[in-house]
Amino acid sequence: MERIKKIIKLVLDEIAGIYLYFLAFYFTCLVLSFFFESWNLFFNWKAFQFSAIIFGILSLLSDKGKKFILSKIEPLKFKRKIKFIIFFKKIFVDLISFFPKKITKKNYLKIILMSVILIYILIKGIEVINFFILAYGLISVLFIMESRLAAGIALLFLISCPILLILKKEGMAETLAIYAYYFLVITVLTQIREYIKENREESPEKVIHS
């Protein structure tokens, strides 16, 4: 029983740790759905909104969520109305300032470049799935994510293709083959970035030894 409680506690803490990212993703998709019809039609909004609410409740049930709420309530020693105003204001400020705190000054140019490319592609009317693949590719290459992740996704798509062909789903198999190609390109570009970064880190030592 204690082991089950520990597992539940760990799961809730993990949900609380990623909830702000999920919430940012939800609001981004919601805003884009007002401007681009393809975004509005792509998502099951009832399920999406239900997931945001459920994950929010689970986050509040975790130790991280409880500490977050208590940290906002304890300093407040005013009237009830003022308490609520300051409480929600503090939460809103934390939500806004959460992501900039995670970003170094060096990466702001990369984020601006990535944003310009994605906004341009959105205006051109890119499909939602292709948009996410492009966004992942830009993040992976610019911020040098683990290339094995993209390679694993590409491999998964490639394995799915013969299975779909056996099931006579030629259209879906062709689409997944295209996605596999995209992720293979992302893998190669990310590995090139990893190689360049490793060489830059090793070069000072070589200069010293020489």
Image (spheres, rainbow, N blue to C red):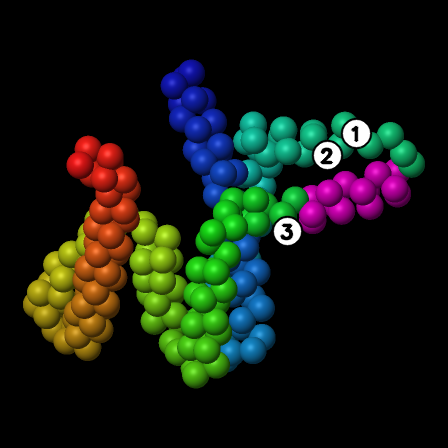
Say what secondary structure mark 3 lies in: helix
| Residues marked 2 and 3 touching at CB (< 8 Å) | no
**Mark 2, mark 3: which one is toward the viewer?**
3
Residue 122: x %, y % from top left: 46, 77
Q: Which class describes the residues within 10 Å of circle 3: few (<14), some (14-19), or many (20+)?
A: few
- What residue type is disc 3 on? Ile
Which residue is the site of mark 3?
A: 96
In the depicted structure, whether residue 9 falls above or below residue 147? above
Residue 150 in percent (x, y) is at 24, 55
Q: Is residue 159 left or right of residue 50?
A: left
Q: Earlier in the sequence, mark 2 or mark 3?
A: 2
Residue 84 appears in which quarter of the rendering? top right
8 in relation to 90, above or below: above
Q: For residue 75, which numbered disc appears in the image? A: 1
Q: Position of residue 132 (x, y in %)?
A: 38, 65
- What is the quadrant of the N terminus in the image? top left
Q: Distance between the residues labelled 2 and 3?
A: 15 Å
Q: Give the range drawn in magenta.
A: 80-93
